[in-house]
Amino acid sequence: MSADVQRAARPSVARRLGVFALRALKLELRIYASIGRLVARRPAVAPGATGFAYHAPVFTILMVFIVLSAVEIPIIDLIVHRWPVVRISFLILGIWGLTWMIGLLAAYLMRPHTVGPDGIRVREGLEIDLPLSWDDIASVALDRRTDEPKSPRVTEADGTRILSLRMQDRTVITIELERPTIVALPGTAPKGGRQAVDEVRIWVDDPSGFMAAVRRHI
């Protein structure tokens, strides 16, 4: 590889590292913000809007990981208690990991999908938060799908770009957009970053309630 090509590649690598570091920092801050919301019982729902949970398919899995992480800390501590440096390192990592899992669960609980006067806000966990105004939305329909592929999030079929936010390969609501709409996804292109989509599919624990709220506002 020539020196010129190497110099041209370096900014790309540096940019990727910078994006990764910024994303990691934002995730860390959102972990603690989500735990704070959970303690204060203040879900991220705008005035006049209604929140709709989507965590039911993953709740049990997250609880199992949290319990296992909590049990693991004293067990590891007992095993390595003779080596103070190792003991402290594992203790810090264990507490951080447990906090992270609790924060992830808190994000699912405190950052629901919302339906309100301004439109629909589509969320998923710590990172995804997509505001769709009523002017952007052509239709909202119950559309149960149980065979959604796990990845990628954005697929294309018959010229329609579809964003699928699945829960265990399932979606239950389809939001058709008036026109190709730019949404910001975690990561960088081609799988993340700013993507133009024509349709959004999501999972909601209470699809009937979600549709009733849509009918009140649309």
Image (cartoon, grey):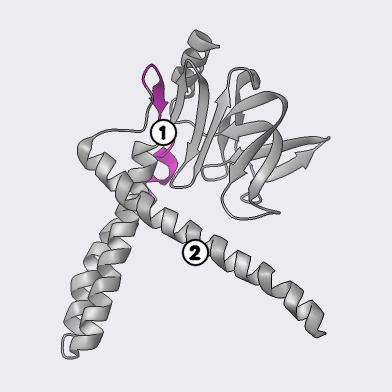
Residue at x 57%, y 27% (from the top left corner): 132
Reading the image, the residue beneath label 1 is 112
Among numbered discs 1 and 2, the one appearing first in the sequence: 2
| Image side of residue 87 versus residue 63, left or right | left
For the residue labelled by badge 2, is the local secondary structure a helix, a strand or a loop?
helix
Discs 1/2, front: 2
* Residue 5 point in image, percent of width and height: 80, 78
Question: Is residue 118 shown to the viewer in this render?
Answer: yes
- What type is the residue that disc 2 sits on? Ala
For the residue labelled by badge 1, is the local secondary structure a helix, a strand or a loop?
loop
Residue at x 19%, y 90% (from the top left corner): 83
* Residue 50 point in image, percent of width and height: 39, 21
Reading the image, the residue beneath label 2 is 21
Q: Is residue 45 above or below residue 37?
A: above
| Image side of residue 163 versus residue 110, left or right | right
**Which residues, given as a range, are shown in magenta?**
47-60
Q: Which of 70/60 is in front?
A: 70
| Image side of residue 63 versus residue 15, left or right | left
